[in-house]
Amino acid sequence: MPRTAPTRTALRICPLCEATCGLTLTIEGTRVTGARGDREDVFSKGFICPKGASFGELDADPDRLRAPLVRENGELREATWDEAFDLVAARIRPLIEEHGPNAVGVILGNPNVHTMAGALYPPVLLTLLRTRNLFTASTLDQMPKHVSSGLLFGSAVAIPVPDLDRTDHLLLLGANPLDSNGSLCTAADFPSKLKALRKRGGTLTVVDPRRTRTAQLADRHVAIRPGTDALLLAAIAAVLFEEKLTDLGALEAHVEQVAEVQEAVREFTPEAVAAACDMDAEEIRTIARELAAAPTAAVYGRVGSSTVEYGTLTNWLVDVLNVITGNLDRPGGALFPLSATDRAPRPAAPGKGFALGRWASRVSGHPEAKGELPMAALAEEIDTPGDGRIRAVISIAANPVLSAPDGDRLDRALAGLDFMVSVDPYLNETSRHADVVLPPPPPSQSSHFDFAFNAFAVRNQARYTPAVVPLEEGRMGECEIQARLVLAVGGMHGAEPSAVDDMVIENTLTKEGAPKELAEQLTGRTGPERRLDMMLRLGPYDLTLDKLLENPHGVDLGPLQPRIPQILRTRSGRIELLPDPIAADLPRLRRALAERPTALVLVGRRHLRSNNSWMHNVATLNGGSNRCTLQIHPADAARLGLEDGAPARITAEGGQVEAPVEITDAVRTGVVSLPHGWGHDRPGTRMSVAAARPGVNVNQLLDGSRLDPLSGTAVLNGFPVELSPVR
Ligand SMILES: Nc1nc2c(c(=O)[nH]1)N[C@H]1C(S)=C(S)[C@@H](COP(=O)(O)OP(=O)(O)OC[C@H]3O[C@@H](n4cnc5c(=O)[nH]c(N)nc54)[C@H](O)[C@@H]3O)O[C@H]1N2
Ligand SMILES: Nc1nc2c(c(=O)[nH]1)N[C@H]1C(S)=C(S)[C@@H](COP(=O)(O)OP(=O)(O)OC[C@H]3O[C@@H](n4cnc5c(=O)[nH]c(N)nc54)[C@H](O)[C@@H]3O)O[C@H]1N2
Ligand code: SF4
Ligand SMILES: [Mo]
């Protein structure tokens, strides 16, 4: 008998951020003891970051829940899976039958885009449940991009990504890929790609109120006043029109309303916006001319251009610039990826367009966007009495008590629900309110395919990694958990979970007009694998699950290709450059020209060794420079009497928090920065490492009323704060 467990290696795509790096894991017995970058991975070619390197610690975190929890007499206790699902069915069905589907609110958090389960089952759950109360991390993040793409291109998921490997010029706004590793632009090893851009003679302009590690790489860093990117971009467009620097190139035949946009941005001259942006008008002209002069260029904005006052307008203007410089849909510009599980391209044809506001939230009347209501309105939908209030919540991979505005109110609201079920590996600030917690296994025990991120990748490719360690005794895979949840909520409690997959396969094949025999040809040991196989076979490449299994380092599908007009689904079949909802929101931006800026506004930041709210429980990731401090410029600190290391009180419309001051000239004057995802000091959680260094919840400063009106996205960046020393 071997005295020690045998050591082996296995490949696993990293699920910890959007870069989707291929990892080579070292495994002793059933324990992951090491992780390095897989040099043969077709996409990531060996890249790894400190989070990926901590895969083993994160995977083996002793605070991860091992068994379901159910609430009995107010206390959570361990239960069997059968008990847990029986309880879900028994409690949720009567609520739906008595009060209708809208009595159930569904919350979907970010990690759903990092698991196969999160891609495959929530859509089925929502189809069966038919609730209008859907809240996701998108309205704390990228919903402005979906709305902008929906309006411009007719499809909310048609999102152009910068062609990082080939572009000559990148204008990057409100993104810090050196720490975030990129977002809506899946590119393993973003740092090298930016360095390579400069090495081949290209240029990088970074617009960010902080001198980030990304900004330090740039040829030009513009420390803009937060929240004013829409003004800057409108001014760049105005210059391009005024100086006749626009050139639509091959797009000419596929775009309408260019003249209308020219008219709409005319008054946003560099001189008109300079004071609001706190920029030099001449520099704005230079940026516009550089953008036009570059042989190819891409404009790309992320979180700092999205979770802001004019989020949808900013995201629209990003693509307006890509269009009027002829860079949209051309190599070196911004292109639409075609992932292996996308539907095979259909011929170009006018579509149904994109509708906003098909229904509105009950309390504040916020319009839906992409079928969702603002996460910032979740608490009021639960705690405001009346017909149609949310009485039960299904929360999957979400921690809105920390990630959404006014966590204290949401905390109270969740505590007052009739019933809550949470699919989450941790008992944290949000899941502690659940009556049933269903814990998925750690990532080593889950198979992985990036349904979401392959569609935003800078190179088309496909990779599948089966689970590297068998399911531990007593565990249930997350696909099965979510399938059983679908059945329990959908009134089919007790049916085989594979029934969900069979139903989806049958419906899809019928809808796609595919031969029925295909269902029998599908390979795969499990329902989710067969669904993946089906999607690959229906997809645009000649791929199957078997082919991916034969190529464990992935299949490269080549650089991004032009997809216009085929991808367009607007009513006109063309890019509608000035959609009505955008035109209707422009007066708000015009008013901003005259507004006097507030003295001090707050922005967030991300740390390389962190991820939103849930990775502070790994000792190797929590510590060092990864701290919840208030960064402030020396001049502002001196003016306000704040000392480095001493606590400051931060006050805003939603409340107050106290955080230690970190004086640094990396933030510009008039701006302070506090990261999100902290505030692990609530009772009843089981995250011991995080609780020992809790930090504070920045989102307690917000009351949920600040939203980008078109997308319902919370304004998490660039809101006014006041500071004082804590004596
Ligand atoms: N102030 C401020 N607030 C922000 C942001 C900001 O920049 N500033 N960023 C926003 C953004 S971009 C986002 S995306 C949101 C994120 O908001 P959320 O999605 O609410 O938060 P996360 O911290 O990503 O974690 C979600 C939950 O998923 C659980 N989880 C982890 N892995 C798995 C898994 O494999 N399966 C399941 N079922 N659960 C899992 C975690 O334990 C955690 O409870 O936060 C937003 N909030
Ligand atoms: N290490 C790490 N990686 C992550 C995450 C994480 O928490 N940690 N989260 C993941 C998630 S969910 C997402 S969505 C992505 C996000 O990925 P990124 O969008 O790259 O995220 P951030 O690092 O928050 O970068 C936003 C930048 O916008 C700047 N900013 C703030 N306000 C403004 C403004 O008004 N204008 C401009 N121009 N800039 C502004 C901030 O200073 C910040 O540097 O990262 C993902 N990857
Ligand atoms: S960059 Fe992202 S995907 Fe790559 S190793 Fe780090 S956390 Fe994982
Ligand atoms: Mo995000």
Image (cartoon, rainbow, N blue to C red):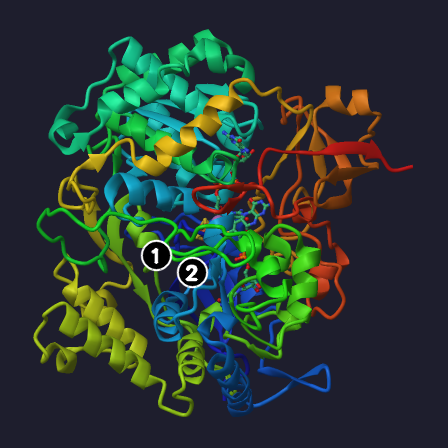
At horizontal 36% and vertical 46% (from top left) the residue drawn is 146
Element class at badge 2 = helix
Residue at the right extreme, as displayed: 727
User: Is 119 rendered above or below residue 72?
Assistant: above
The crowd level at tag 2 (other Cα within 10 Å; few <14, some 14-19, many 20+) is: many
**Residue 557 locus on image (x, y percent):** 19, 51
Q: Name the residue beneath numbered marker 1.
A: 452
Element type at mark 1 = loop
Question: Do callouts 2 and 1 mark residues in contact (Cβ within 8 Å)?
Answer: yes
Q: Residues within 10 Å of mark 1 (few under 14, many from 20)?
A: many
The C terminus lies in which quarter of the figure? top right
Residue 464: quarter of image: bottom left
Q: Name the quadrant containing residue 554.
A: bottom left
In the rendered view, tell whether residue 482 sits above or below residue 642.
Answer: below
* Image x and y of residue 521, in percent: 13, 79
Residue 550 on image: x %, y %: 21, 67
Callout 1: CB less than 8 Å from ligand 4: no
The one nearer the camera, 581 or 300, is 581
Instruction: Residue 188 in the image: state x and y as whole percent.
Output: 38, 46
Q: Is mark 2 within 8 Å of ligand 1?
A: yes
- Residue closer to the observer: 216 or 677: 677
Q: Quadrant of residue 608?
A: top right
N-terminal-most mark, 2 or 1: 2
**Who's the residue at 87% across and 38% down the image?**
726
Residue 278 in view here: no
User: Which residue does the numbered mark 2 point to in the structure image?
Assistant: 114
Q: Amino acid at mark 1?
A: Ala
| Visible residue check, residue 284 | yes
